[in-house]
Image: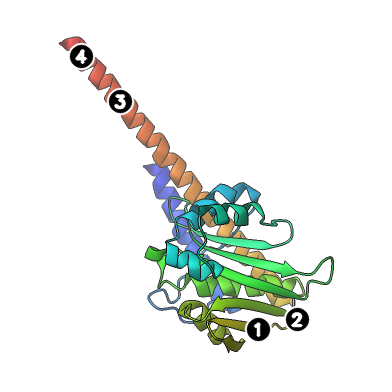
């Protein structure tokens, strides 16, 4: 239990430090219902996280899949989408719960080749039980910082007009919206990168990685403790059987 106490203490410390850093660099400038002032660790994902990405998307309900992809995506569609992810070019971000499962996922697809990535498309999904916590907005803010640092001048969002949370995120960011029947397109022009945007991304990533490592260690500890308890129960059961 000592290790868990240390882990939780470190997590609280990183949270407090992270909150101060984010407040200083202006990342938490938007008020989020029921989550205001809370620093949310947003972790950059790589190909090794592909199984967790698939699990997240497959866990979405039918209507949520429809809103995310713009069509009734079945399991096969999701597998194909995940297998086509370009981790070397695009940025995929995840918000993990304490079990290290992805509860919110964002995909920033950089358009163009070489040094001509002047625009990017943003998409996001959040599991049903985790809605209302501002995860979508925070993921969008994170994507904006990276896009700026990659010299992207515009972020593009294509969403169904009924996707109110996504439309709200775009409108709140100051994006230009154009509605065409059941679909809405949003365009957000980005300022050029500067020292602030570069430092912001560095600090955000370091905080997220530290948070992830702490959660990972905590999960391993509880797994180890569970195995020890199972062994003890097995030994006790064996002694009881021998006594009989």
Mark 1 vs mark 3: in front: 1
Q: What element carries label 4?
A: helix
Q: Earlier in the sequence, mark 1 or mark 4?
A: 1
- In this view of the protein, which residue sits in the foreground, 243 or 95? 95
Q: Which of marks 2 and 1 is in front?
A: 1
Whole-percent x and y of residue 118? 77, 76
Q: How far apart are marks 2 and 3 (CA)?
A: 60 Å
Residue marked by disc 3: 232
**Furthest-right residue in this view:** 115
> In 3D space, how far apart are the residues under numbered discs 2 and 1 (Cα atoms)?
16 Å
Report how far apart the C-alphas of labels 1 and 4 lie in the structure: 71 Å
Label 4: few (<14), some (14–19) or many (≥20) C-alpha neighbours in 10 Å: few
For the point 66% across and 78% down, the residue is 156
Location of residue 141 with respect to 44 vertically, above or below: below
Query: Gap between marks 4 and 2, in whole Å?
Result: 73 Å
Tally the marks: 4
Q: Which of 95 and 231 is in front in this view?
A: 95
Residue 135: percent from left, percent from top: 48, 70
Identify residue for label 2.
192
Circles 1 and 4: CB atoms closer than 8 Å? no
Seen at 40% across and 78% down, the residue is 33
Q: Position of residue 98 (x, y in %)?
A: 43, 53
Residue mark closest to the camera, 4 vs 3 = 4
* Residue beneath disc 4: 241
């Amino acid at each position: 239990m000592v290790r868990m106490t240390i882990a939780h203490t470190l997590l609280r410390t990183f949270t407090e430090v992270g909150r101060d850093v984010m407040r200083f660099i202006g990342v938490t400038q938007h008020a989020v219902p029921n989550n205001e002032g809370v620093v949310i660790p947003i972790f950059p994902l790589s190909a090794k996280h592909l199984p967790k990405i698939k699990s997240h998307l497959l866990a979405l309900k039918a209507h949520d899949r429809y809103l995310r992809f713009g069509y009734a995506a079945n399991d096969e569609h999701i597998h194909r989408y995940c297998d086509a992810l370009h981790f070397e070019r695009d940025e995929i971000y995840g918000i993990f719960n304490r079990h290290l499962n992805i509860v919110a996922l964002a995909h920033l697809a950089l358009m163009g080749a070489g040094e001509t990535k002047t625009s990017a498309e943003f998409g996001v999904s959040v599991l049903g039980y985790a809605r209302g916590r501002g995860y979508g907005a925070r993921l969008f803010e994170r994507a904006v910082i990276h896009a700026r640092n990659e010299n992207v001048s515009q972020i593009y969002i294509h969403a169904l007009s009924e996707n109110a949370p996504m439309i709200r995120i775009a409108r709140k960011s100051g994006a230009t919206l154009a509605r065409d029947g059941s679909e809405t397109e949003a365009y957000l022009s980005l300022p050029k990168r500067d020292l602030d945007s570069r430092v912001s991304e560095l600090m955000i990533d370091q905080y997220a990685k530290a948070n992830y490592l702490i959660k990972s260690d905590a999960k391993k500890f509880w797994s180890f403790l569970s195995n020890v308890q199972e062994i003890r129960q097995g030994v006790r059961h064996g002694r009881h059987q021998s006594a009989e």
